[in-house]
Image (tube, rainbow, N blue to C red):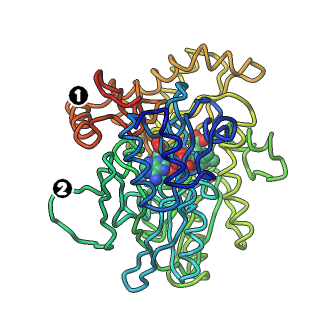
Amino acid sequence: MTPDNLIPALRDIVGAANVLTDDDCAEYESDWRQRVRGKALCVVRPGCTADVAAVVRACAQAGVSIVPQGGNTGLVEGSVPDASGEQVIMSLRRMQTVRAIDAANMTMTVDAGGVLQSLQDVASEAGMLFPLSLGAEGSCTIGGNLATNAGGTQVLRYGNARELCLGLEVVLADGQVWENLQGLRKDNTGYDLRNLFIGSEGTLGIITAATLRLYPQPAAQLTAWAAVPSLQAATALLALSHRHLSAALTGFEVMSQEGLRLVDTHYPHLRVPMWRETMWCVLLEASDSESEAHARAQFEHLLETAMEDGIVTDAIIAENIRQAHDLWHIRESITLAQAAEGPNIKHDVSVPISRIPEFVAQTDARLQALAPGLRLINFGHLGDGNLHYNVQPPAGADGAAFVAAHEAAIGDAVYQSVHHFGGSISAEHGIGALKRDHLPHYKAPVALQLMQTIKQALDPQCLLNPGRVLERRPGQMAR
Ligand code: FAD
Ligand code: 2HG
Ligand code: ZN
């Protein structure tokens, strides 16, 4: 097999209609943020695990590398090819089968291309909850969620995608299939292979199916929106919420005034509450196993106490599901409002929660000194210590020119500060290509060496998503 006869071989495997070339590849070749546009040899769309394995074997024989792709909503430039025109994009989106729901085991086993929202619906129709939830849930896939170890808005109660997965089926770089879908909660038979693939961003294997943990549906879910005078007050409210609500606290998001201003500017019909009067707003969610009345009483008590303590200045509790949905919609629109405003710089970071106020104060000052007038669009999953510490160019500036001139220096300043405060330069979005060259500065050399050793052992030809997460090493073969 050579690269020249790879396309006919792929057509034999998946059918001609599922091998796209030339202009038909366009929607797969650029990332959600439209920051990068690559050029693929072709897009191949397998329909089952056997197809995936056969495609991988054909690509391995031809020495052609593969970029796995799910919903293509990733934010770190990991799901699109380089500009060479020599890589194959493997889109898993056709693989949507729900293989099994095991109510007694509280699991479901699904193909990797299942869209997250439809899997939430499947769980709900079975009377259970699949709690992974993020703004891109209408188009991201469970394979992509696991490949990135996605976080989202329910992590403080249910954990990241990793914690929600009991087993995987993975096609390895040589086309073998590793299957581990039994749904076991305990299995101490050696190295944890599942967790090696989760978060590996398509560089170690192609996830074709997963067995996922399900939870009981809460009897009631309530959402509140609170104005807080400072980030110190927001972290104090978080601690108070943990004490009052315990395991019922399922969401705790923080949003800066600048972030909400952008939502108000671009989507005024969303009627953002309270943002003009306060520097920070918090969105809280409680999931109660008793009743709505119980949840409401607990929430009211929490917010009254917070007001007495001076850590909340104003608050509303959603009256119904519609209102709750509207409040969440505002929070999830910040990313879209940033895109509507123009080019921007993203930093998805985590810092110990106790250090967040100091981290933000110091880093804000540092960035304003670097590029006076820049707008800090700071929001995120405060309950997990995860901030989307994003930057929008100064109002009226040429956004593209600002990003080109300042992105590197701003990124260095933010990541140095994150490092100083004992944090991580990627909390939930991953490394991809965007942060690959930053990683060696902040990850221990021993850890990087272990990662390279694992990559070399599992993918010696460097066939799977080369140059993502880790730099390609000289001598690694596939194009
Ligand atoms: P893709 O973007 O297609 O791929 C992501 C990475 O996974 C790539 O490296 C790709 O090669 C690899 N990959 C994809 N499928 C497979 C597979 N089957 N096997 C092996 N590798 C694979 N992320 C969060 O964590 N939390 C959030 O709250 C959040 N909110 C978002 C909101 C918006 C509006 C947007 C646009 C994105 C958001 N994201 C968030 C980022 C993104 O949605 C997640 O990273 C998501 O998990 C990606 O899933 P995907 O199917 O789109 O994967
Ligand atoms: C979110 O939490 C996502 O909304 C996207 O992780 C964050 O736009 C971003 O930077
Ligand atoms: Zn997020």
Please name the residue shown 74% across and 44% down the image: 263
Please name the residue shown 58% across and 20% down the image: 368
Question: Residue 191: which disc?
Answer: 2
Q: State the residue in front, 119 or 252.
A: 119
Kind of element beneath mark 2:
loop
Q: Position of residue 187 (x, y in %)?
A: 21, 69
Q: Position of residue 49 (x, y in %)?
A: 43, 61
Query: Image check: 97 left or right of 478?
Result: right
Q: Is mark 2 within 8 Å of ligand 1?
A: no
Please name the residue shown 58% across and 38% down the image: 378
Q: Please name the residue that numbered disc 1 is placed on.
A: 445
Type of amino acid under label 2 = Tyr
Kind of element beneath mark 1:
helix
Q: Write down the quadrant of residue 247 in the picture.
A: bottom left
Marks 1 and 2 sit apart, C-alpha to C-alpha, by: 22 Å
Q: Quadrant of the N terminus?
A: top left
- Residue furthest right as drawn: 269
